[in-house]
Each structure stands twice: as structure tokens, then as C-alpha cells.
């Protein structure tokens, strides 16, 4: 027992040195690149889903776009539990308190399984009305039902996987989180090929492949967390105090807002788009999937910022937190630009990789070009949003989270659609992205000015 305790203390001390003394750019890159790769692979297999299903027809591809919204709803809860618990685990480890870290991660993990089970049960009881509410037409509905059942079946392991992934990241073990997600992504791609092409199982097969890959990814992440993490997972560590649950939800609430409002705006987008036909829904689905691929670069480097900001802020290393924010914004802009510029120049060719229909190409070409420009502004809005969440200022982070997919996106969508019809739908998200980035600038300047420039407080 003493050896185990000494091992925990030694690991905590080594982690403290790593997080507070490693040069900030190197630390963020070390933590952010594995996360970025994980998100890129995840989005690649989402696009592979889109590709394989796209070979079946417009309605089948549109069905994956409808379910993309349902997946985002599930992920909203997952992000809240994962990032809420992860931030508190980082705080506990900065205080060398592994018992508290175990309490937060265990509480979030078993709560995630409970929420996922509720999602599955509620979804199956009202699947068809739910799919219609998300924008499904009569021609899309049968395919959405086939894919949707697998989304609901896998909900518990998906949410629990997000908790494991985020807590591994916040413990500075992003490389292990990457292995779990990348392995799942590769299995999903192989499963798509076998079930859709070889066995001819259609949309049902694509959903089955995704569910299998998510289950395998969960097992790998759980194994790594048990073996590598300082915080233990076990029923005995689950909190009996309501304040622990409330703290996780409060800190993670901005992440839930980001994902939840994204689901709401996507549902509105699908409903407004369906009056223009299945080709329009399929085109917007392709653009949304590819935009998510572009976004994951900014989100990946931003998630590399989160453990650095959370840990160093608690350790009163304020100068490092400010350096981390500035570096993350600059690196995010460069990396997003490298990927978005080709999609601005060759949008038609990119859309044609997923759907050959001339109607889909005509709609998707302009939409992708606009979306690729808008995501450049995520390099301003994403890092500062994640910063305030990580340093446990959820009120400010919640306000920033409300902007992109809520306070700006939804009104913009209605206004532009009423003025310009389908063109308005194509430009609504880029306009919201640009405005969100510009509004984030005062928050960035305020943090840099109001936060102490030295770490003298930590030396007292």
C-alpha cells in the first residue's frame, strides 16, 4: 500500500514539473498534436461514412446528415461531463490530491453511462418523431432509422469514451487518448468497406461499423486510463455529495452549450434546407462534415491549451497561461489556414469526392468556399472560450459558447434565408463564425491585461 501511495506521489511531482517548467509552445504542441490527430482521424472516418453512404444515393447521404445532429446532442452531454471533470482533475492534481481526482473522474464516468442509457431508451421510444424533428423527409426517414438505431445503441459507450478521453488529456496523456480514438477510426473505415461495399448492407451497415468501432475505442481508452492515469475509476470513488455533480456540470456547461446549440442550429438548418430537396440536404451535410474536419484543427490545438491553462492557473503560473493563449491562437490560425485555403480554391473537387450529383455539386461548391473562410476566425474564438472554461470561469465561457451556434447563428440563419433563400443557408454559418471571432477579441484583450504578468504570487 505504501509503495502504491509513494508511486502516486512521485507521479504527481513529476507531472507538476512537466506542466509548470516545460516551455509552453513545446507543451501545447505535445498535448495538442495527439488531440488534433485524434480529432482528424475521427472526422476522417465521419467523412468516410459520408463517402461510402454517398455512393448509395442522395437520400442515404442526407440521412447521415440528419443523424449528425443527433450525434451532436449526445456529444453535448459527453463534453460537459468530460471537460467538467477533466478541469477539476487537473486542479486536484495541481494540488497533489489524487483522491479528489479519482472522485471527479469516477463520478463523471458512471454518470456518463447512466445518461447514455437514458438517451438510448428515450430515443428508441420516440425514434420516428425525433428523426422528423431533426429534419428528415419521407424519402430520408427509412435510411435515417437504419443509421439512427446504431447511434442510440452506442450512446452509453460514446459518452463514457468522451469522459475517458478528456481526463487522459487533462492528465497530460493525450497520446494514449489518441491511440484509442485512432484505432477506433481505422476499424470504422474497414467496417464501412466490409459492411457497405462487400456485404451490401447499406446505411444499416455504415451505422453498425460506427457502433463497433466506438465500442472498441471505449475498451482501449478504459484500459489506458486504468493503467496510466493518476485518478482511479471505481464505484467506491463515486461521489455521495451533490456538490461534486454540480461542479462537474457547472464547469463543463460551456462545452455542452457549444455542442447543444450546434445540434439545435443544425436541426433548424436541416428543416430550412429540406424545402430545397434532398440534394440540398446532402450538399449541406457534406459541407458540414468537411467543415467539422477543418474545425478539428482549431479545436485540437485548443484542447492542447486546456490542461496547460487549467494546471498552471491553479499553480499560479499566470505568465505561462498568457503565453499559452497567445501561442494557441497563432498556431491555430496557421494550421487552419493551411487546410482551409485548398478547400477555398477547389471546393467543387472536394465535394465531388463524396457525391457526384450535379445538383449537390452546384450547392456544395459555394457553401464549402464560404465555410472554409469562416473557420479561419475560429482561431480567435475557440482558444479564449476553452481558456475561460479551463481556468474555471464558466460564466464567461458560457457567454462565448452562446455566440457561434446560438445567439449569432440562429438569428443569422433565419434572416439570411428569408432574404436570399438557399444562398442565405450557405452563408449563415460563415457569417456567425466571423462575428464570433470579432466579438471574442475584447475578451482576449481583457484577460491579457487583467491577469498578472508575473508568477510572484506562486512564490509567496
Image (cartoon, rainbow, N blue to C red):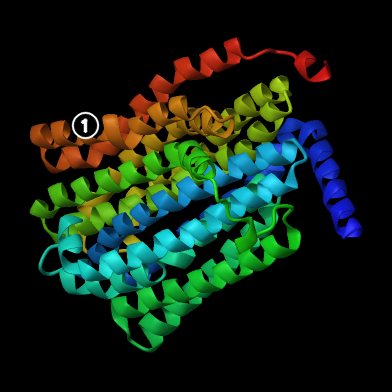
Q: 139 above or below 429?
A: below
- Give the left or right position of residue 175, taking residue 113 as reference: right
Which residue is identified by label 1?
A: 412
Residue 20: where, in percent of width, then height?
A: 78, 32
Q: Residue at x 25, y 43 (%)?
A: 265
Q: Residue at x 72, y 55 (%)?
A: 229
> Quarter-wise, where is residue 127 in the image?
bottom left
| Viewer can see residue 341 | no
| Viewer can see residue 43 | yes
- Give the left or right position of residue 104, taking residue 406 as reference: right
Q: 445 above or below 38?
A: above
- Give the left or right position of residue 163, taking residue 289 as reference: right
Q: How many marks?
A: 1
Q: 275 above or below 194?
A: above
Residue 442: where, in percent of width, then height?
A: 46, 15
Q: Residue furthest top?
A: 449
Residue 387: where, in percent of width, then height?
A: 56, 30
> Quarter-wise, where is residue 304 in the image?
top right
Q: Residue at x 59, y 69 (%)?
A: 183
Say which of 134 and 294 sits in front. 134
Q: Please, what secondary structure does the residue beneath circle 1 have?
A: helix
Q: Residue at x 53, y 43 (%)?
A: 84
Say which of 239 and 165 sits in front. 239
Q: 453 above or below 347?
A: above
Amino acid at each position: 500500500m505504501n509503495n502504491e501511495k509513494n508511486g502516486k506521489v512521485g507521479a504527481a511531482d513529476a507531472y507538476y514539473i512537466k506542466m509548470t517548467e516545460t516551455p509552453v509552445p513545446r507543451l501545447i504542441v505535445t498535448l495538442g498534436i495527439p488531440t488534433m490527430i485524434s480529432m482528424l482521424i475521427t472526422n476522417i472516418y465521419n467523412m468516410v461514412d459520408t463517402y461510402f453512404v454517398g455512393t448509395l444515393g442522395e437520400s442515404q447521404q442526407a440521412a447521415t446528415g440528419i443523424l449528425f445532429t443527433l450525434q451532436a446532442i449526445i456529444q453535448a452531454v459527453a463534453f460537459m461531463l468530460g471537460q467538467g471533470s477533466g478541469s477539476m482533475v487537473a486542479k486536484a492534481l495541481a494540488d497533489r490530491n489524487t483522491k479528489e481526482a479519482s472522485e471527479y473522474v469516477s463520478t463523471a464516468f458512471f454518470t456518463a453511462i447512466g445518461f447514455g442509457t437514458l438517451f438510448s431508451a428515450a430515443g428508441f421510444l420516440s425514434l420516428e418523431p425525433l428523426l422528423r424533428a431533426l429534419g428528415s423527409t419521407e424519402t430520408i426517414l427509412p435510411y435515417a432509422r437504419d443509421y439512427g438505431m446504431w447511434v442510440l445503441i452506442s450512446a452509453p459507450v460514446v459518452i463514457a469514451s468522451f469522459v475517458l478521453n478528456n481526463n487522459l488529456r487533462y492528465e497530460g496523456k493525450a497520446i494514449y487518448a489518441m491511440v484509442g480514438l485512432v484505432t477506433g477510426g481505422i476499424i470504422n473505415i474497414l467496417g464501412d468497406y466490409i459492411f457497405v461495399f462487400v456485404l451490401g448492407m447499406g446505411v444499416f451497415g455504415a451505422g453498425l461499423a460506427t457502433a463497433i468501432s466506438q465500442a472498441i475505442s471505449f475498451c482501449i481508452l478504459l484500459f489506458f486510463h486504468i493503467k496510466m492515469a493518476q485518478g482511479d475509476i471505481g464505484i467506491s470513488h463515486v461521489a455521495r455529495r451533490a456538490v461534486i455533480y454540480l461542479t462537474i456540470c457547472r464547469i463543463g456547461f460551456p462545452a455542452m452549450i457549444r455542442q447543444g446549440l450546434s445540434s439545435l442550429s443544425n436541426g433548424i438548418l436541416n428543416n430550412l434546407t429540406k424545402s430545397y430537396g434532398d440534394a440540398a440536404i446532402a450538399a449541406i451535410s457534406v459541407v458540414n462534415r468537411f467543415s467539422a474536419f477543418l474545425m478539428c484543427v482549431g479545436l485540437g490545438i485548443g484542447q492542447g491549451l486546456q490542461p496547460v491553462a487549467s494546471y498552471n492557473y491553479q499553480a499560479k503560473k499566470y505568465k505561462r497561461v498568457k503565453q499559452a493563449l497567445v501561442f494557441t491562437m497563432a498556431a491555430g490560425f496557421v494550421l487552419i489556414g493551411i487546410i482551409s485555403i485548398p478547400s477555398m480554391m477547389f471546393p467543387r473537387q472536394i465535394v465531388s469526392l463524396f457525391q457526384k450529383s450535379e445538383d449537390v455539386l452546384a450547392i456544395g461548391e459555394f457553401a464549402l468556399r464560404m465555410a472554409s473562410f469562416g473557420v479561419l476566425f475560429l482561431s480567435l474564438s475557440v482558444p479564449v472560450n476553452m481558456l475561460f472554461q479551463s481556468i474555471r470561469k464558466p460564466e464567461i465561457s458560457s457567454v462565448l459558447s452562446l455566440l457561434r451556434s446560438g445567439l449569432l447563428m440562429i438569428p443569422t440563419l433565419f434572416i439570411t434565408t428569408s432574404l436570399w433563400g438557399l444562398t442565405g443557408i450557405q452563408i449563415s454559418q460563415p457569417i456567425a463564425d466571423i462575428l464570433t471571432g470579432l466579438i471574442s477579441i475584447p475578451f482576449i484583450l481583457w484577460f491579457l491585461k487583467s491577469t498578472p504578468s508575473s508568477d510572484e504570487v506562486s512564490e509567496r
